[in-house]
Image (cartoon, rainbow, N blue to C red):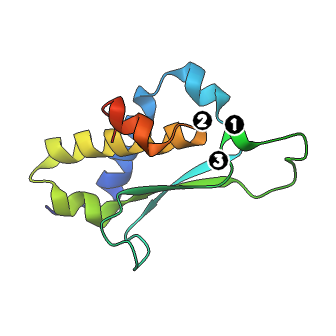
């Protein structure tokens, strides 16, 4: 599947538009990025949350760089057959990584169907 970076970024934006506003308002000090490729040691990774989840932040959490949610374009496109597949996979990946920001681990996400 091929898709321009601009269109892929639009789909990430649309996925974020579907996240309830109440949750987006609770997100703190986090940036969401579209990146072409994941780290070389994890070529099949679709998304990655890097930082301190809200449940890990204590009284001394201040003055730190924003957490990062990276959505990896090329691996997502590689597993999709058409744009509808990309829309679905982007939505799942965005929700999955946002959930990590709220402290939900992979095991729980898989149990909820967001693996």
**Residue carrying label 1:** 55
Q: Is 44 situated left or right of 22 in this image?
A: left
Determine the image quadrant of residue 14: top left
Is residue 26 in sight in this rendering? yes
| Left-right relation of 80 to 106 | left
> Which residue carries the number 2 mark?
102
In this view of the protein, which residue sits in the foreground, 92 or 35?
92
Q: In the structure shown, which secondary structural element does the residue marked by tag 1 occupy? A: helix
Q: Position of residue 68 (x, y in %)?
A: 59, 55
User: Residue at the bottom extreme?
Assistant: 40
Badge 3 is on which residue? 30
Q: Residue at x 30, y 32 (%)?
A: 113
Is residue 28 something that shows in the picture?
A: no
Crowd around label 3: few <14 · some 14–19 · many ≥20 (10 Å): some
Instruction: Determine which quarter of the picture holds residue 18.
Output: top left
Closer to the eye: label 3 or 2:
2
Q: Nearer the viewer, mark 1 or mark 3?
A: 1
The relative height of residue 54 versus residue 43 in the rendered view (above or below) is above
CA distance for labels 1 and 3:
14 Å
Q: Between residue 56 and residue 11, name the one nearer to us.
A: 56
> What is the crowding at mark 2: few (fewer than 14 residues within 10 Å), some, or many (at least 20)?
some
How many C-alpha atoms fall within 10 Å of the one at disc 1: few (<14), some, or many (≥20)?
few
Assess whether mark 1 and mark 2 are in contact (beta carbons under 8 angstroms).
yes
Closer to the N terminus: mark 3 or mark 2? 3
Mark found first going from the N terminus, 2 or 1: 1
Label 3 sits on a secondary structure element that is strand
- What percent of the width, then of the height, locates residue 96? 42, 41
Q: Which residue is at a point 65% across and 53% down the rendered structure image?
A: 67
């Amino acid at each position: 599947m091929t898709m321009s970076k601009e269109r892929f970024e639009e789909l990430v934006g649309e996925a974020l538009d579907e996240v309830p506003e109440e949750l987006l308002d609770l997100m703190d000090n986090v940036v969401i990025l579209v990146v072409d490729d994941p780290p070389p040691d994890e070529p099949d990774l679709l998304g990655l949350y890097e930082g301190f989840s809200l449940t890990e932040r204590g009284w001394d959490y201040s003055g730190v760089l924003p957490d990062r949610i990276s959505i990896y374009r090329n691996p997502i496109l590689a597993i999709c057959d058409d744009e509808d597949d990309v829309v679905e996979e982007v939505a799942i990946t965005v929700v999955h990584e946002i959930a990590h920001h709220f402290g939900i681990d992979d095991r729980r996400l898989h149990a909820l169907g967001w693996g």
